[in-house]
Each structure stands twice: as C-alpha cells, then as structure tokens.
Image (cartoon, coloured by chain):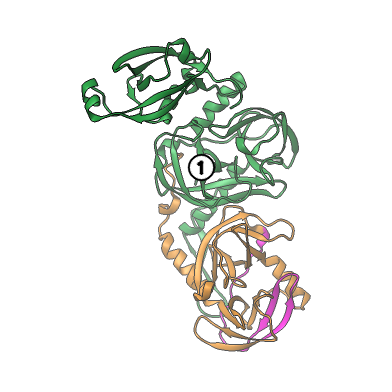
Chain colours: A orange, B green
Amino acid sequence: MAAAVNPIRAAGISVEEELGAVADRLRLSTVRVLGGDGCGSGVIWRPDGLIVTNAHVARSGLQRVELADGRKFTGKVFARDPRRDLAAIQIEGRNIPSLMIRDAKTLRAGEMVIAVGNPMGEVGAASIGIVHSAPRNRSLIFADVRLLPGNSGGPLADVEGRVVGINTLVAAGLGCAIPSNEVARFLRGLGIVAR
Amino acid sequence: MCESVRRFRVFLVGDEPQEKEMASALVEFSNGLADAVERAGKSVVAVLEGGRAGVSGTVWRDGIVVTAEHTIRSEVEVTLVLPSGETVKAKVVGGDPSTDVAVLTVGAKAATVAFADAAQVKTGHVVLAIGRRGEEGVSASFGMVSATGGAWRTWQGGKIDRYLRLDLNPYPGFSGGPLIDASGAVLGINTSGPRRSVTTIPNATVDRVVDAVLKRGRVTRGFLGVGVQPVAFPEASKAALGLERNRGLLVITISEGGPAEKAGLMIGDIIVAVDGNAVAHASDLQMALDPEKVGNAISVKVLRGGKLQDVKLTVGERAGRE
C-alpha cells in the first residue's frame, strides 16, 4: 500500500474524541417529534426555535417536541410540504441550540457524514458513514450510512457538525437525505431567509 | 490535498458557535477519503448494458477496461460512460467466467488506476468500493477488511491469488468497480459474492486474465478427460500401500480421445496423487487444470489391480468458452 495508510493516527487529537464531540453537539440540536404512531426526529434549524423535520413525521397541526436537555414543548406545525416531505415546526423558548448549515452541493463522494436521530425509539443515536454519491441538481443525498425508522427528520451532518441534509428514507440499503439547499428553498417559500 | 490545520468548530450551548484553529484528524481523514474517491473515480467508468441497471468498469491499462464477466451479455460491444461524461463504445475482447473478469478495449483516453500491493493489506484496513452509475457520477461505499487469506479457488475452478473478506455494503452497480485503499490505490476488482457479500478479485489475478485475454482472446483451461468420484479404502490397504491418506479418486468415465485415454488410464483406476500431491476430492485436480499446465506432462499415481503405478499424462486444453 502506498504510505502505510490509516490516516487515523496522523494528527494530534484522537479521532474518537473528535467524533464524540461532534456527535454530542449534533445530539443537542436533534429533537424528538412525538406523534400518534411513534416518534421521529427533527433538527433545530434556527436559534429562534424553528425546527425542520419530514412531513411524514409531523402529521398534525400541533406536535409534541422534546429537546435533548429534557425540555418539552408543544410545537406548531406551520408548514407542511408532502411532495418535498418537509415540515417546519415553531417552538417558543430561550437558549435553543441550533446547528450550522452547509450547502449540500459542496459535498464530495467519500466524505464522512454522521446521522443522529431516534431510531427505533433509541434517543440520540449516532451512526457514521460516507457520502455515496454527491447530490446532483435537486436529487437526494445518497449516503452509505445506517438509517432506521425514527431517524426520519433528523440531521445528516459533516464531520464538523454542519447539517447537510434531513434523513428521510432508505432505498436499496442507502440512506437518503433531503439536501440542505432544498430545505433552504422550502423555507424561502415560507418567507424565511437563511441567516 | 488537505492542509494539516483546519478550522475546527468548538460549540457551546447558545446561539452562535465559537471557532478556533485546531488540527483536526477527523476532518483530515474525511477529506482524505473524498480525495481517494476522486482520484480513483477518474479511472472508473459506467458499463450501461451490464447487470440489471448498469455496472461499473475500471480503466486497468491504457485503452483496457476490466469489468465483472457475469454482468456482460454481449460478446461484441458495450457502451461506457467515461469519467469525462463522454459516452463511447467498447469492444468485448474476452473474459474468464472462472475468475469473473471481462476485458474490454476502448479507443478514448481515460486515466489508468494506481495499484496498491494487495499482499500488504491487513485486517482492519479501511477500504472503499468505487462505482459509476450512468450520468450520476462516481459512488463510494465505506468498509473495512475483515479477514485476509491466501489463494483460493472459485467453484468454477478459477484461481484467486488472495482472499479478502470485507465488511462493506454492496450497492447496485458496484460490480466491476475497484476496491481502493484510503490513499486511492487499487487492490482489485469487486464482484458480487454469496449472500450480499463482496468478492474482490486481486490485482495479480486480474493482470493474469488481462494478459491471457489480450494474447489469446480467452483464458485457457486444462483438460484431463476423466470423470472421477471420491472413494475411501480401508486403513489396512493404506498402510500396505504406504499411502498418505486413505482416499482417492475413482475413475468412472474416460473421454474419447482425451489426454487420460491417450495415457492409458482405465475406468476403475483410483487416482491417489498428482505430481506427488495426494488427492481426495475432485477439486484437488484443479491444480492440474491451471492455464499454464496446458501442454505439460503431469505424473498421475493410480491404484490399479491392488498395485500402485505412475502414469504420465499430457494436459490438454478444454474446448469452448466453458
């Protein structure tokens, strides 16, 4: 092998510690969205309490939302777009930790991604993988990452903890996420402009 | 590639994240993987007619593309989408079903792969399977080498120079694409294994098939002209005859005019060794059937009428594609 490979040992801080830190940070901004048939996930998109999730997760007008720190809210689902499978929920509170957003068009195939959510009721579970194919035009992000029911609506993020997509479905074993730029388009349609 | 110090964000609970400069091994690792995929992806093509919805191919040498033999139905030509996005026709030169490698030639230019030494691969190494699907571009799956081993044979008798067991998900269209290490160097060609697993045909095996196909248009296989059945004989006769094992291969058919008949083998003979190696299963004869054995004389030890005798046999060549 060219240059005895694993880059894992290359730098000063351990990769595990860094991964743990990023996963912890993502967990803080991943909410549980509780509905009639189980629980999905959601991403705190803005510090003013705007939460983005899947339309198939937020089915009713009011939805129970639980933060990682244990706070419980009743969120108002003020927009649903079943075609895009996106929904926007507003909660009212202080110190709501949001995440940074990265344009999914800048993703590269092979880059690492982390999915956080509540698969099968497990709260704040993280799974790691890579971008399978970079999203083209307005297609989904395909990721070689393990997703399960309950991951829906949760963040797919890069290794720096920036959200690149909303985990939505599994196709042929691949995790599929709605790209962040598609979410931005959805929010712009509601009159919400990116910071 | 990636710089060693990157902006790594340290987050606090609050409205805005703070940033500070830190070396991030994680960011570097992730960028390294994306770089490896990009580098190798320049030599990965899409084979449009392969499999159900297209497979992948790897630019092995200048103008030579290899892919998975089982996915190719045409014996004449296939359509490729090159990394440049260009669609071209490639000629099917030939293939070897026993190692699942097909060789195509293409006029258009594309970068060839960089090779890694498959012998250096250890359990635990990070590997990626690369593919290309039509115009969707390059695709990658992440995995790890979960076991390695020496040479093995496929059920069709093809010799695979090294065993690599992978913890890696095979996604549609990955067949024929390369397995790469974390630096982007190629370890072999991937094809589908049993139970949704990945089988990697290592570089040395692919090279051998490419050389044979370019030289002769096919991979030759040896032919002995016998049908055999494993038999066991009593321990007493094993000791009396001074044999290593109490097993042998009973000759039950002899092909008309085949190498075995010419050498004087008869139905009822029990083959106990070939070139000094004891045989107990029909698959033990595969070693006498490798391409380089064609035309060579081998020594077959048979038990006939209660006595051991050596028979010289010249390995023939199997006719036809299979």
Q: Residue at x 60, y 19 (%)?
A: B216
Q: Residue at x 75, y 35 (%)?
A: B88
Instruction: Tell me, yes or no, whether the highlighted magenta stretch contains residue A85.
Output: yes
Density class for disc 1 (Cα within 10 Å; few <14, some 14-19, many ≥20) is many
The relative height of residue B13 versus residue B79 in the rendered view (above or below) is: below
The relative height of residue B127 versus residue A40 in the rendered view (above or below) is: above
Residue B239 falls left or right of residue B68: left
Q: Which residues are magenta?
A: A76-105
Q: Residue at x 21, y 22 (%)?
A: B240
Q: How many marks?
A: 1
Q: Check the picture and name the quadrant holding the C terminus of chain B.
A: top right
Q: Is residue B11 visible?
A: no
Q: Compare residues A65 and B104 and report the one nearer the observer.
A: B104
The relative height of residue B11 versus residue B229 in the rendered view (above or below) is: below
Query: Residue B148 lies in what quarter of the image?
Result: top left
Q: What's the residue type where badge 1 is placed?
A: Thr
Q: Compare residues A129 and A151 and report the one nearer the observer.
A: A151
- The percent coordinates of residue B151 (x first, y second) are 42, 34
Q: Compare residues A115 and B315 and report the one nearer the observer.
A: B315
Instruction: Tell me, yes or no, whether the highlighted magenta stretch contains residue B279.
Output: no
> Helix or strand or loop: what does disc 1 sit on?
strand
Q: Residue at x 61, y 25 (%)?
A: B321
Residue B312 falls left or right of residue A83: left
The relative height of residue B200 versus residue B157 in the rendered view (above or below) is: below
Query: Residue B272 lies in what quarter of the image?
Result: top left
Circle 1 sits on which residue? B199
- The percent coordinates of residue A3 (x first, y second) are 44, 41
